[in-house]
Amino acid sequence: MTQTLSSAALEAQALSRPWFYPFKLPSGQTTPSYDGGWLDGIHHTRSTMLDAVLDATFPQNREDATAIDLACHQGWFSCQLAQRGFARVVGVDARSEHVADAGLIRNTLGLDRIELIHSDVHSLDTAALGTFDVCLILGLIYHLENPVGALRVARALTRKLCVIETQVVPNMSGMVDYGSYKFVRPLKGSFGIIDEIDDTHGPEASTTGICLVPSVEALVWILRKLGFARVEVLPPPADAYEQLLHGKRVMVAAWVD
Ligand SMILES: C[S@@+](CC[C@H](N)C(=O)[O-])C[C@H]1O[C@@H](n2cnc3c(N)ncnc32)[C@H](O)[C@@H]1O
């Protein structure tokens, strides 16, 4: 009886305000999401794409598998990993309000296999955390001034599969006289600079305001140099959210071996 009342109270709390994500709650109701659900499409497309790569990589029982979700926000993907059978899921976010929200959703959904850490991705003690079968780094690196450092953290935490999702910029290619015409080097990719200096109060934004957004070519090249054996840009479904459909954002899978 106490359990039922407690679940109902948690749901009532969750339903009382808008969320970044449309969480399906135990009663069947869905949390109201920003701007009447305007962004729901991007979340559903990314969930579909993530499911496809998880099904291909972990077709069997996931009861021994672990996962970490870097920049977990309110826990949309952490909850899905737990609901899809991962034994242990760790969610990490730099914003304490998101960690609190993810805790509320976890408790509402009864997903006690999710642990939450309040931390900047760059400050994580990767040696202490160990490795995880799956590492998610979705919607984060284009908000960072050190995206390569964050990808190094992701690589250190990955035992099998890392999934990266990011906004991308057009690529530049060509040759560069690198100090002298005698030392010519090919460009391996590009980064674009985006200004979020006035947006750092925003719940989804950068915490520092200087953002380096990679081209797809840069991202794939960096992931290979960080030691991933196989890197694939995942195909979006036919009904994907427009940014993923048109290659303005990509989801990339990187396998350790
Ligand atoms: C656009 S949201 C993406 C959230 C979620 N991963 C997704 O894809 O839906 C960006 C998230 O990154 C978090 N974030 C920003 N900078 C961070 C940092 N340096 N370390 C950890 N999290 C950070 C924000 O608090 C926010 O939750």
Image: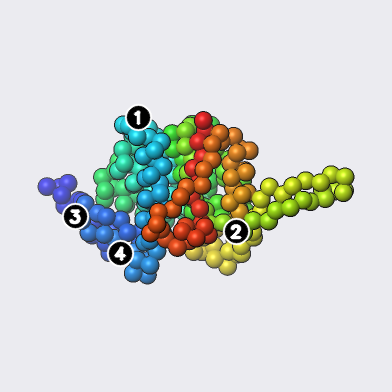
Name the element at disc 3: loop
Task: Residue 90: name its quadrant.
Answer: top left
What amino acid is labelled 4 in the image? Pro
Q: Please tell me the numbered disc located at residue 64.
A: 1
Task: Judge by depth and name the residue closer to the eye, 141 or 222.
Answer: 222
Residue depicted at 51% across the width and 43% down the height: 232
Give the mark toward the camera: 2 or 4: 2
Is residue 107 visible in this depiction of the protein? yes
Task: Judge by depth and name the residue closer to the eye, 234 or 112.
Answer: 234
Q: Is mark 4 within 8 Å of ligand 1?
A: no
Mark 3 and mark 4 lie on one chain; the one further toward the N terminus is 3
What amino acid is labelled 3 in the image? Ser
Q: Marks 3 and 2: in contact by CB < 8 Å?
A: no
Name the element at disc 4: loop
Q: Marks 3 and 1: in contact by CB < 8 Å?
A: no
Q: Please tell me the numbered disc located at residue 169.
A: 2
Horizontal placement of 50 versus 61: left or right?
A: right
Residue depicted at 44% across the width and 53% down the height: 236
Mark 2 and mark 3 lie on one chain; the one further toward the N terminus is 3
* Vertical arrangement, residue 82 with respect to residue 203, above or below: above
Q: Which residue is mark 4?
A: 32
Horizontal placement of 159 versus 28: left or right?
A: right
How far from the left and from the top, in percent, is residue 16? 27, 64
Residue depicted at 49% across the width and 40% down the height: 162
